[in-house]
Amino acid sequence: MNNMPAILGMDVKRTYWSAETVFATTLTSALSALGETIDLQTKPNFNPEEDEFLDRAFSSVAYQNYEVGFTIISKVWLRSGSVFLPETFWAKYALGETTGRATDGRLDSFSLVSKISTPTATEYALFNGCMVDGLTIAAAGVGKALIYTLEGRCQYVSKSATKAFTGLQTITVGADPTLPTTAYARWDGTAPQINYGAGLAAITGVIDWRLAIKNNLSPEWYKRTGADALIYPVAEFFDEGDFDCTVEITRWRRDSTHWTQKLARTTGIVLTLPINGMTWTLTGGYFPAPTAPDHKSGKDPLKETLSLKFSGLTIA
């Protein structure tokens, strides 16, 4: 008989979000669903600096600017009326508009609330002043769930045993949302289409695809006086850097269509991706590293990876 006590870990139960009308100021309005969280990684860095070395050991530690990042990996539900519209979050905060990349290139901020279960209780974490540094949407195969990976940066993260937080902010966050009851969004096998100048045509033999967006954020530092009257050396805002948008598609190589376009140094490529009932159209594309597909003898099927970079993106 095993009399060893059970060892239980922590588990992220849900991750919710709410819009901010002022950067890093969390509102008390009802929270919105983000998706089914697979993994949440918090990356706080308080930049410690060791001072006054005596006998080869430091005598004190001073903390510099607070940097907080996070990574969320999640599934999303199928579009379901107004209950859950993926583009409301993923597109708006990664691109600037729900219809695609904002013409002014600017991004909005949001607050994030994670609900975490421990062996004995439930805890909450509040991330305020969040902006999307990177977003990846991947389809690993036909019929498999779409996986969203969000890389975020935020001003600060607080922890509480309840929805009431004190410290930098004194606030009780809003009510949990009603979650969708629809199935997860999956890639149904609809092929991405590509236009090299003669009109859109389906890419044949697609095995998987991956869309990656990077905003290359950088912080503007300042000292914020918290609700507790303490001084917090945090980011006043995050400036958007160069917009980077890439797509990788793995396919069975059945022809030389794409290799021919790589060799021709074709530019102005247009690509469409079917994502959860919407069409994401990428424009201004080219092959930044036109690697050759494998050439080998034998009967083994050949694979080819198409790696493209784009300057524009719209959603409809």
Image (spheres, grey):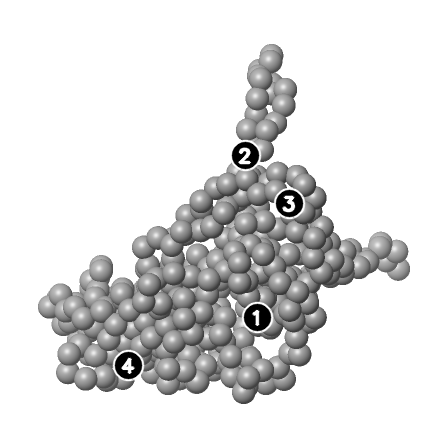
Q: Residues within 10 Å of mark 1 (few under 14, many from 20)?
A: many
Amino acid carrying mark 2 in the image = Gln
Q: Earlier in the sequence, mark 1 or mark 3?
A: 1
Of residues 185 and 103, the one nearer the viewer is 103
Q: Position of residue 252 (x, y in %)?
A: 29, 76
Q: Going 25% across and 78% down the picture, which residue do you hit?
A: 194
Q: Which is closer to the viewer, label 1 or label 3?
A: 3
Q: Is residue 28 left or right of residue 284?
A: right
Image position of 124 with respect to 199: above or below = above
**Real-space CA distance between mark 3 and mark 2, rounded to the nearest whole angstrom:** 16 Å
Q: Earlier in the sequence, mark 3 or mark 4?
A: 4
Q: Earlier in the sequence, mark 1 or mark 2?
A: 1
Q: Which is closer to the viewer, label 1 or label 2?
A: 2
Amino acid carrying mark 3 in the image = Gly
Image position of 34 with respect to 274: above or below = above
Q: From the image, tell me which residue sits under label 4.
A: 193
Q: State yes or no: discs 4 and 1 in contact (Cβ < 8 Å).
A: no
Q: From the image, tell me which residue sits under label 2.
A: 64
